[in-house]
Amino acid sequence: MFSKHVGKELSAYCQGELSAEESRRIAEHLIGCHRCRSEFEEIKLGVKFAEHLPLIAAPDALWDDLQVLIEKQGSHAKPANEMRPTRKSGNWRLGFAVVAATLVLTFGVVAFWLYRRESLPSWEVARLDGTPRIGSAGIKEKSRLAVGQWLETDEVSRAKINVGSIGHVEVDPNTRVRLLETKITEHRLELVRGRLSARIWAPPRLFFVDTPSAVAADLGCAYTLEVDDAGASLLHVTSGWVALQLKDRESMVPAGAACATRPGVGPGTPYFEDSSETFRKALAKLDFEPQNTEWSKIPSLDLVLAESRPRDTLTLWHLLSRVQSTDRGRVYDRMAELAPPPAGVTREGILNLDETMMMLWKENLENIWSSDSKLRKTWIGFWTRSLGKVKGLEGKK
Amino acid sequence: MEQLAVMAEAKVDDRVIKACQQGDREAFRLLFEAYKDRVFSIAVYSLGGDRAAASDVTQQIFLKLLTTIGQFRGDSQFTSWLHRLTVNCCIDEQRKRRRLLAFEEMPIDKTRHREPHERRYERMEIAGVVKLAVSELKPKFRLPVLLKHVEGLSYEEIAEVLGCSKGTVASRLNRGHKQLARRLAHLRAQLVLGD
């Protein structure tokens, strides 16, 4: 099942230079190979930086300078068939040609502008209830959401967005969402208020939703994401995995788990929704109100540790790198009690946040956190079969 | 301005090239307007951001284009031909400058490069930082990155311009992208937020 590493082909994959068949092979490998996925992330970052390279306008005086140079060079600068002035007898032709060229150029500019306007990348939007709006125009049945446009629903309207052929997003009432980007390496929405449900079957980290307090990166999944008026958000994952990220802070959220975010803080610690109420309340205090004096009388970390079940090692694993180093030992001990670390993972290494050991333990714990290994396989199979239909991967060249 | 250049480029067809070959200066002006920014950009990036030197090289490239366009037989795309000319002139200029630097500026340059990347990059805007990071890549990694991201060429077209295989282009771009990511990793959050 495991195929050869694909490191050498990752730039070509990232930039849509491969055939659909090759892209499918790479994507399939990336899903299962942590090493190549890390490399892919690095290359994708490099590509993104390189996309910021601007075209630099040549100085206005360049043509005049060039003319002078041509004159100076004299006969040396003449082409094989000799540079010669236009014949006098052809002056009327020249005048006509100039007028015609101006007209053609004007027509071309207008046509080009219209073409660019028409060909802006967009997604299909279908009305589900009420009258959702794109900009100021109401959607009767179907419409298209172009990059930069806002889709808004009122208290009775709902809409469904088809994300190319890689999935769909249902937009609930009282929601405001904007399409920021749609290209082969990235599809990105901005959710500033309300709630959406996404179901995506693309390779990991192709579909993103920006919120005021974090970015949700799809890792092949279904989830709902809601944002309140203060910019705080709550993510519920129903299948697969989602990563919530703000700067260096990242929370990995599997199916059955949730994670809150707050402006200025970023993503909190993920937790399973069937964990105890005490556990969830203590975790919220730990994440977002560490300075609350009233609460600080109650040892919230102790409560989280005491209430943890083996499955809650999801939360504890994230806490390892977030608690004070003086508390890390307690978190490790509780985790080791609930799910002993695999060979190669030591207490000392974890207390020093050794990256390899952290990843090794996480991979080992994923069997406890995620019960969807069969589902995941099914998803990979489905994705593999349907990849050829993904519009973003076809005809890029 | 960019849009006008795109329009001008759209108007450069076989007839314009033929007219240039027959010495039509208006046609040559059209050709110049269509490609001057692209040629100038490659020159600026290749010459470490030295715009004055890039202007000189751009003039030399167009002068050379004027004198040799008669040799263009249409066996390949005109743009590939022009890009090859551009790349070769920039490489020649870099060689000349390296020889001069060997006698004049090398000690100062070495000192400058000892400063950590992060310190030099930290106060610059993303585009400026990327420009600097790209100009510091080795030419064999820098040129494919420029041809891909500034010129928008496909891997196959880059291979034709550089006279190497598509696989070599892929491998050099891989390494170029990785080096950019590593040099600018500390700006990742800024890039994500900026997006």
Image (cartoon, helix red, strand yellow):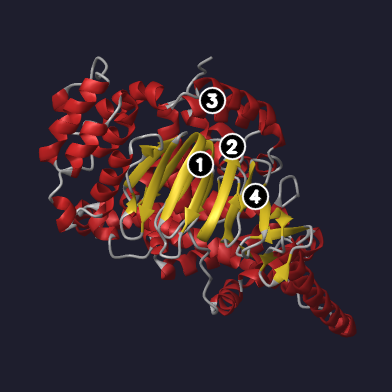
Which of the chains bears the disc numbered 1? Answer: A
Q: In whole angstroms, how far apart are the C-alphas of marks 3 and 4?
A: 46 Å
Q: With B31 as the anchor, is A365 left or right in this view? A: left
Q: In whole angstroms, how far apart are the C-alphas of marks 1 and 4?
A: 39 Å
Q: Say which residue appears at 10% left-offset and 39% top-offset.
A: A326
Q: With B67 as the anchor, is A208 left or right in this view? A: left
Which corner quadrant of the image does residue A379 belong to?
Answer: top right
- In this figure, which residue is indicated by the disc labeled 3? A376
- In this figure, which residue is indicated by the disc labeled 4? B80
Work out whether disc 4 and disc 2 sit on a shared chain: no
Q: In whole angstroms, how far apart are the C-alphas of marks 2 and 1?
A: 8 Å
Which of the chains bears the disc numbered 3? Answer: A
Hey, what amino acid is under mark 4? Ser
Q: Residue A323 appears at what percent x and percent y?
A: 19, 42
N-terminal of the two: label 3 or label 2?
Answer: 2
| Secondary structure at numbered mark 2 | loop
**Few, some or many residues within 10 Å of mark 2 (<14, 14–19, 20+):** many
Q: Say which residue appears at 50% left-offset and 16% top-offset.
A: A2
Position of A73 relative to A356 (above/below) = below
Single out the mark in the foreground, 4 or 2: 2
